[in-house]
Amino acid sequence: MTTVSIIGNGNMGSAIGGIVAAGGHTVEYITRDTADINGEIVVLAVAHPAVAEILEQRGAQLAGKIVVDITNPLNFETFDSLVAPADGSKAGEIAAALPNSRVLKAFNTNFAATLASKQVGSNPTTVLVAGDDADAKNALIDIVRAGGVAAVDAGALKRARELEAVGFLQLTLAVQEKIQWTGGFAVAA
């Protein structure tokens, strides 16, 4: 059994925690008052502006852990662009800031409702996972699948750039009410 620590207990953190628990694993929710992070896998289930503070305050605790970035680095002032460089990703920046952690990008192309229902329209929900460490990706993929959700290895961490773009597009469509928060992009195999 794996312990997954989730920083953030909003809709996404709760939905991810539900998947982890459904698969028989332990969920630990981390708040500002939590002293230690006990999970082998740590999910950053926060808005991307909160990540810098988390890395500053808890970077040493994240060493040796699998760190999952679920953020979509939106420009929250305009909601019309990403703040990641065009040739990189926020996940890549997190990996550079945490050289002793194994950083993955996952869950950012999913809405909380589709994770909880395990459906995107009439299709099963699929979590895309990108990262440079095969063992770390497989550990997360196994947990997601055990919780009843499909998961696909999306390649190296450099694929986070495309995942962030897809997440951004999906969010802007939902905000404009062109798709529902219970819908979005699905992967059909």
Image (spheres, helix red, strand yellow):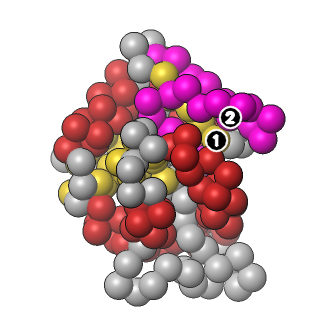
What residue appears at the point 64 percent right and 58 percent down from the top-left corner? 56
Disc 1 designates what residue? 7
- Given the image, on which type of amino acid does mark 2 rest? Ile
> Is the Cβ of the residue at disc 1 closer than 8 Å to that at disc 2?
yes
Q: Is residue 17 above or below residue 188?
A: above
- The answer to whether residue 147 is left or right of residue 136 is right
Q: Is residue 185 above or below residue 92?
A: above
Q: Could you tell which of marks 1 and 2 lies nearer the N-terminus?
A: 1
Residue 51 image offset from top left, x and y in percent: 62, 59
What residue appears at the point 45 percent right and 57 percent down from the top-left corner? 98
- Given the image, on which type of amino acid does mark 1 rest? Ile
Q: Is residue 65 above or below residue 107?
A: above
Residue 23 image offset from top left, x and y in percent: 42, 18
Q: Secondary structure at mark 2?
A: strand
Q: Mark 2: give few (<14), some (14-19) or many (20+) Cα within 10 Å.
A: many
Name the one closer to the observer, 119 or 71: 71
Q: Residue furthest front?
A: 60
Q: Which residues are magenta?
A: 25-46
What residue appears at the point 59 percent right and 32 percent down from the top-left corner? 37
Name the one closer to the observer, 92 or 142: 92
Q: Quadrant of residue 99?
A: bottom left
Disc 2 designates what residue? 30
- The answer to whether residue 76 is left or right of residue 186 is right
What residue appears at the point 48 percent right and 22 percent down from the top-left corner? 3
